[in-house]
Amino acid sequence: MSDIYDEIGVRKIINARGASTNLGGVLLNDKVMEAMNIANQNNVDMDELFHKSGQAIARLIGAESAFVTSGCFAGLVQGAASIMSGTNPKFIRQIPDTTGMKNEFLIQKQMRYLYDHCIQLAGGKLIEVGSSDGATIDELSKAIGPQTAGILHPVHMENVPGTIPLDQIVALGKTKDIAVLVDAAFQYYPSSHFESIIKSGADLIGFSAKYMGGANSAGFVCGKKDRIEALALHSFVENEWVGIPPRTTGVQTFGRGYKLDRHDIVGMVVTVKEWLRTDQEERLADMEAKVTTIKQSLDNIPNITLEEKPAIAGNPPWVELWINIDEQNLGRTARDIEYALIQGDPPIWVTARYLLHYSGMDSCKENFGTIIIRPITIKSGEEHVVAERLRELLQS
């Protein structure tokens, strides 16, 4: 079979950026691909598949209940909608118009992040609590009002000083009888950290498939059984049930746009299964070996320093190589290096950003930049190409 990318004229790249949505995520696990191909050979009742797949995932991870979604973000949108609507058919049909519903979600000000508009997409309103210096549990408690539906808590933002951790958020939610919606997209490593989030008592917790070696377009939400049942009512299959025995009433839902195919759902189940079987030490050792190859190639190059970042709880489940560049002395910025890599043959994608090197509490220099290499998506042998290209650009 001919290469479809070549046929339609799309360039293949070396992905040193990691599980990037804009690059199509990661290369799928072989077992996941096999299961998806098998699923593609037959049609099934999608409603049954949704519920049975959710039960399978819940058993695998030790959750009360689970539901497959078209990515973590979609799961958070559907989760927010279900928190506001409950199982009320009128409200479900009405979303994203939240008239008559509790529609406010609290978020700590220093936890605002790229994906918190999941609340607004469902028709909710975000209410900031605290300041850029932090928030207290007392401030959060006092911010709860008659329109408060829940609290949005992105776990990966807990490394920001002054944030209130998940266990305190969950305890407050129970005391005040409001829902806790958690973004835990890549909180898979180590296994003890993954398990602690699942067992936290949060109402709904969203995860992404791509960080586990699964599809870019899949994820799942787990949590309390009644909350998952309400979330399921916002899925795309609800639109298709009108007049089909034994269900004779369907509910129009905005979730119609978050469609999944049967092989996506099956692939999510197998992704979880394979992740739990993975030898994590072996997985990380492979990445560390690629980082070592690149570090050795860049050794003794002036105007750069190298930092290897280990995989730790709260961060994505991979190691990283940070190439810190003195842009002023090098005469090129990290962005320049990034663009040059993308324009090469083959294109190499990395992450470039500014680093803030503080010389005092109120001052910083912005003439330092960084190139971040994430070997999780570097195929065997490609690390040598990445190393050679970086050496050429950083020496020139």
Image: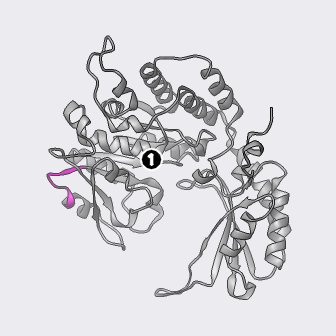
362, above or below 10, in the image: below
Which residue is at the front of the view, 91 or 171?
91
Q: Position of residue 379 (x, y in %)?
A: 78, 48
Residue at far top of view: 245
Rendered-image quadrant of the C terminus: bottom right
Q: Position of residue 376 (x, y in %)?
A: 69, 51
Q: Position of residue 303 (x, y in %)?
A: 75, 82
Question: In this image, 1 relative to 111: left or right?
Answer: right
340, above or below 53, in the image: below
The image quadrant of residue 129 is: bottom left
Which residue is at the front of the view, 288 or 92?
92
Rendered-image quadrant of the N terminus: top right
- Whether residue 66 is visible here, answered yes or no, is yes
Which residue is at the front of the view, 300 or 6?
6
Q: Which residues are magenta?
A: 143-149
Q: Is residue 145 magenta?
A: yes
The image quadrant of residue 65 is: top left
- Whether residue 64 is visible here, answered yes or no, is no
Q: Is residue 336 magenta?
A: no
The coloring applied to the image is: one colour
Indicate the amino acid at tag 1: Phe
Q: Which residue: 59% across, 39% down?
A: 215
Return the residue at label 1: 73
Q: Which residue: 59% across, 46% down?
A: 211
Question: In this image, 165 relative to 336: left or right?
Answer: left
